Every structure is written in structure tokens, then in C-alpha cells.
Amino acid sequence: MFQFQYECPNCRLVSEPYATRGRAERRGQKHRDELHDGMHPIGEAILQPEFRAPQGKEWQAVAIAAALILIALIASHL
Ligand SMILES: [Zn+2]
């Protein structure tokens, strides 16, 4: 699941993660209003982590989940 965070390099902080970009932007607006008189700090951004492929033993969980889905699909067509 993607999570969005507001980053203010001027204050050297990152917000808590939000499920939508809009919520992270609203959090940024609140931060600007409270700490920067509504001005936009240079370099502020909305961070969106890139998709990370499963690593190491996480692949086992992916394989098991895929197998269960496949079994459920086959069973539903019998
Ligand atoms: Zn700030």
C-alpha cells in the first residue's frame, strides 16, 4: 500500500504517513499555516515511497498466497 508523507526540509521533519496524497497535502497546508504563516518552505514535498518488491523470505508468503488464490480459483470452477 502506498503511503504519502509531507516533508518540510526547513523544519527537518516528515509527517506521519497518509493513505492519500490529498490528506498529506492538507497536513502540509496545516503545517505551513501554523509554522510558516501560510508560506511555502523551499524544497517542501509530498513523499510517495516507491513500490518495493518482496525480499528474502517475503517471497515465501507471496508464493503461499498465490497458491491459495490459485487453489480457490480452481475449486470454484469444479
Ligand atoms: Zn516547516
Image (spheres, rainbow, N blue to C red):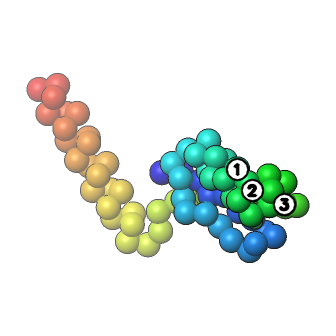
Identify the residue at the far top of this view. Answer: 77
* CA gap, disc 1 and disc 3: 11 Å
Point 20% across, 41% down: residue: 71
Q: What amino acid is labelled 2 in the image? A: Arg
The quarter of the image that holds ligand 1 is bottom right
Tell me the residue at 74%/74% (across/down). 12
Q: Is residue 7 left or right of residue 2?
A: right
Earlier along the polypeptide chain: callout 3 or callout 2? 2
Distance (Cα) linking label 1 and label 2: 5 Å
Ligand 1 lies under 8 Å from the Cβ of mark 1: no
Q: Foreground mark, 3 or 2?
A: 2
Q: Pick whichever, 38 or 69, lies toward us.
A: 38
Front-most of residues 74 and 38: 38
Q: Residues at badges 3 and 2 in contact (C-beta under 8 Å)?
A: yes
Q: What element carries label 3?
A: loop
**Disc 3 CB within 8 Å of nearest ligand 1 atom:** yes
Residue 15 horizontal/vertical position (percent): 61, 63
Q: Which mark is residue 41?
A: 3
Q: State the mark number for residue 32.
A: 2
Whether tag 1 and tag 2 are in contact, CB under 8 A, the answer is: yes
